[in-house]
């Protein structure tokens, strides 16, 4: 008789554990604000070589948007960025594949920005390592 009760008690106990476990998340905590986690500190300490660190693929980001985001990118621990192809393209229709159909070898296009914006991005990025 005891052997038949033990599996039932274990099943009930297991069910209660599974049913009650998610409720712990509803209990109030000491602080409702999330604790920030930083991959790098403010002096960045980023590796010098791209292969020794993290690369952020800024696919279809405008050059000015990348430049404005550089402090956040460095704080996140990225030591290099990769942009979409910078050569001239066909008319801007928002199609991603246009980036891979160059029409000339000039730097800059209507999707990403001008050559001057690209050079400004490169100059600013050098400040972060």
Image (cartoon, helix red, strand yellow):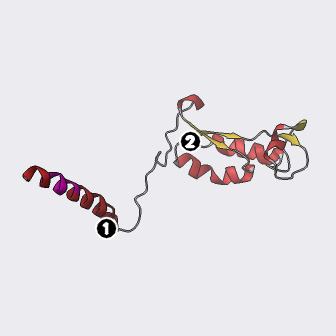
Relative to 116, does residue 36 appear above or below in the rendering? below
Q: Residue at x 26, y 58 (%)?
A: 15
Residues rendered magenta in the picture: 6-11
Tell whether label 1 touches label 2 (CB within 8 Å): no
Count the marks. 2
Q: Residue at x 82, y 49 (%)?
A: 95
Q: Which mark is residue 67?
A: none
Q: Residue at x 66, y 54 (%)?
A: 68
Q: Residue at x 70, y 42 (%)?
A: 123
Tell me, yes or no, whether the highlighted magenta stretch contains residue 17: no
Left or right, 86 with respect to 67, comes to right
- Between the residue at mark 2 and the residue at mark 1, the CA separation in whole angstroms equals 32 Å
Q: Position of residue 64 (x, y in %)?
A: 73, 53
Q: Position of residue 47 (x, y in %)?
A: 53, 34
Q: Which residue in the protein does label 1 denote? A: 29
- In which quadrant is the C terminus drawn? top right
Left or right, 119 with respect to 39, comes to right
Furthest residue in direction front, as rendered:
1
Q: Quadrant of residue 35?
A: bottom left
Q: Which mark is residue 78?
A: 2
Front one among 71 and 29:
29
Relative to 81, does residue 36 appear above or below in the rendering? below
Left or right, 100 with respect to 42, comes to right
| N-term-proximal mark, 2 vs 1 | 1
Neighbours of disc 2 within 10 Å: few (<14), some (14-19), many (20+) = many
Left or right, 6 with respect to 39, comes to left
Q: Position of residue 14 (x, y in %)?
A: 24, 55
User: Of helix, strand and loop, which one carries label 2?
Assistant: strand
Tell me, yes or no, whether the highlighted magenta stretch contains residue 7: yes
Front one among 100 and 10:
10
Query: Most prominent secondary structure in the magenta stretch?
Result: helix
Relative to 100, does residue 10 appear above or below in the rendering? below
């Amino acid at each position: 008789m005891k052997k038949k009760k033990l599996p039932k008690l274990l099943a009930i106990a297991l069910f209660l554990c599974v049913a009650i476990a998610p409720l712990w998340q509803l209990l109030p905590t000491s602080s409702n604000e999330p604790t920030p986690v930083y991959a790098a500190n403010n002096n960045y300490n980023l590796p010098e070589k791209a292969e020794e660190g993290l690369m952020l693929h800024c696919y279809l980001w405008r050059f000015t948007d990348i430049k404005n985001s550089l402090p956040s990118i460095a704080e996140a621990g990225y030591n290099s960025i990769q942009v979409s192809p910078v050569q001239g393209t066909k008319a801007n229709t928002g199609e991603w594949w246009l980036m891979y159909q160059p029409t000339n070898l000039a730097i800059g296009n209507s999707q990403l920005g001008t050559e001057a914006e690209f050079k400004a991005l490169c100059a600013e990025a050098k400040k972060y390592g």
